[in-house]
Amino acid sequence: MSGTKTPRPGTRRIWSSALGVLAAALLAIGVNMLVDRLAPRARIDLTQQRLYTLSDGTRSVLQGLTDPVTLRLFYSRRLGTAVPAYGAYAERVRAMLEEYVAVSGGRVRLEVFDPEPFSETEDRALAFGLQGVPVDQSGEQIYFGLAGLNLLDDERTIPFFQPERERFLEFDLTRLVYELSNPRRPAIGVMSSLPVNGDPRMMMMMRGNPAAQPYAVMQTLRQFYTVQDVALDAQVIAPDIQVLLVIHPQNLPDATLYAIDQFVMRGGKLIAFVDPHSEGQAGRAGAGGRPPAATSSNLDRLLNAWGVEAPTDGVVLDLRGAWRVRASPTDRVQAVDYVAWYNLQGDSISDAEVATAQLNQVTVASPGWLRLRDGATVEMVPLLRSSERSMRANVERVRENPEPARILAEFRPDGQRRTIAARIRGEVASAFPEGPPAPPEGAERPEGFPAHIARSSGPANFVVFADADVLEDRYWVRVQDFFGQQVATPISDNGALVANLVDTLSGGDALISLRSRGESLRPFTVVEDIRRDADARFRQTERELTERLQQTERRLRELRQGQQGQGQSSAVITPEQRAEIDAARAQILQTRQQLRAVQLDLRRDIEGMETWLRIVNIAGVPLLLALFAIGLGVARARRRAAARA
C-alpha cells in the first residue's frame, strides 16, 4: 500500500470547511425558496412606529368586503426611468396593493397598466380622470394614478400619487376601498360662525382666492359623510344627523342652545369648538372691512350644566413645539418662538384613546383650557394637553397687536399641564330644566317639535375643544399647485384628528388606525428643547436690556428739561448728564456681554449634543461589535483551555 497517500489533517479541515460553506449556502437558498412559496408576504416590521404594517382598520375594511372591488393601477414605466425616486415609490404602491389583494381574500382585484402614448390604455386613464404630466419637451404624458370600481360602476380615483403624501399612502388607498364598499354615508351636521364652507363674498370678488375656498377639513369630511349645514338659529336638529359639529358659537339664541341640548339628551354626538380668541376670525375682515371686535366663543350655558368649564378670559402658552415666526422689524433677531402657536406632540396627545393613539402632531393657536366643575359627575378624558413648559396668560396678550418677542420675554412656565381638548362621558341633565324656551320673536316652533327630555337617555358622549383654530388650514395643511391641480399636503394631524373623532362618534372605527402613519425622519427633540430654553433666556435678557435703555432715556430727557427750565442751553452737557451717559454705556456694554454669553452657551450646548450624537452614530456601533467579538473570543479561549485541561 505504499502507493496510496493519506490526506493531511490540514487538507481535511479545508475540505470540511468548504463543504460546510456549501451546505450553508444550499440551506439558505432552500429556506428562501420554501418561505417564498409557503409565506410569500411574511415579514417582520422592526420600526418603532410600525411604518410597514397594515393597520387593524385596513384589515377590518378589507376582510369585511362583501362585493368585489377592482383596482386599476396606471403607471408609466418611463416615469421611473426618468425619475428614479418615482420608480421606488411605484414599487411600494404596487407592493401595498398586492398586500390588499392577499388580505381581502381575493375580493380586491388588482390590474396594472402601462399607458403608452396615444394608446387605448392612455385613453382609459384619461376617461377615469387620471392626471397626465409631461415628462419632457416632446409633450408626452406620463401617468401614475389609481382607479377603483365596484359592481355598481361607482368610481373613485387617485389622479396622481404624490411622493409628498407617501406617509398617507395607506390612508388614501383604504379610503378609496372603503368608499366603494360603503355607498351609504353617515350624516353629520355643521353649525358654524366661521366660513368653513367658503366665503361667498370673497368668491365673488376674488375668484380662485384660496381664502374663499372651503376649509380642507370640510373637504375631507365630505369625502366620507353626508354633511348638512345647520343654521345658527335652528330650533331643532334633524333626527338623521348622527354627529353635530358646533364651531366657534357666538351669541347663539336660547332656542338654538335648547336644540343642541335636546340633541345630546336624545343620544346625539356633539363635537364643540369654543375659543377664547379665534386667530382665524381675527385675521378676516368683518363688516365694513374692519377686523371683528369680538373673537371669543362659548357654550357656557350647556357645558356648565353638564359639569365642564371652558374659561374665555385666558389662553395657554407653551414653549415646547412653539412656532418660529418673524420678529418685529425693530428686533435684532429676525425670528422668535411664538409661544401662543405651537405643536402638540408626544405625551401631549393621548395614546389611550382610539381617535388619537396614532397621531403624531396636532397644531393649536391661542387655545384655552378645559376643567371639570366642582361636583361634576361626568368623566373627562383628555385628548390634547399642554406640556409642563406652559403657562396661563390673559387673553389680551394675544388679542390686539401681539408682540411675540415680548410674550416670550415674559414667559414663565408654571409646570402645570392643561387640557385643551377632551372627551366627556356620563349621564347629564338638561341645561333647560324648565323646558323649551320661547321661540325667537316673530318665529314659530316648527311642526313636529319633539317633546322635552330632562335627562340624557344613557351616558352622553361628546367632545370639546378649547380652540377653533385647530380647523384653520394654515395651521395644518399646505396647498401647492401641481401642474394646475391644487394638492393639499398635511403638515399636522388636525384634519385626521377631527375625522377620527367623527368616525368614532358615528360608530364606524374601521378607518381610525390608519389616519396617521409614523414619520421615517425623527426630529432631534432634545437638541430642539435646548435651543428653545436658551432662546427664551436670551429674550428675557434682551427684554431687560430694552427696559434699562428706556429708563436711561427717560432720565436723560428729565435732566435736559430741568436744564431748560433753569435757562441753560440743551447743548451744554452737565456732569450729571455725563455720568448718566457713561452709566448707560456701561450698562449697554455689560448687557451685550451677557447676551453674547447666553448665545455662546446656546451654541456650546447644541454643539456638545451634536458631538455626542456623532460619536454614538459613527463609533458606537463598531465599538459594540468590537466588544462583542472580544467577549466571544475570550469565551471561546476559555472553553478551549477548559477542554485541554
Image: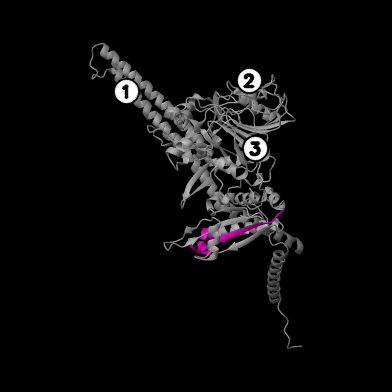
The part of the chain drawn in magenta is 66-87
Q: Measuring 65% from the left and 44% from the top, which residue is drawn there?
A: 185
Tag 3–tag 2 contact (CB < 8 Å) = no
Residue 438, labelled with which disc?
2
> Mark 3 = which residue?
350
Which of the two residues, 221 or 350, is positioned nearer the viewer here?
Answer: 221
Residue 100 seen: yes
Q: Position of residue 4 (x, y in %)?
A: 73, 86
Picture quadrant of residue 440: top right
Of residues 144 and 533, the one nearer the viewer is 144
Q: What residue is pinned by disc 1?
A: 581
Count of marks overlaid on the render:
3
Q: Write down the quadrant of residue 205 in the picture.
A: top left
The quadrant in which the N terminus is found is bottom right
Quadrant of the snapshot with the C terminus: bottom right
Whether 473 is drawn above or below 586: the answer is below
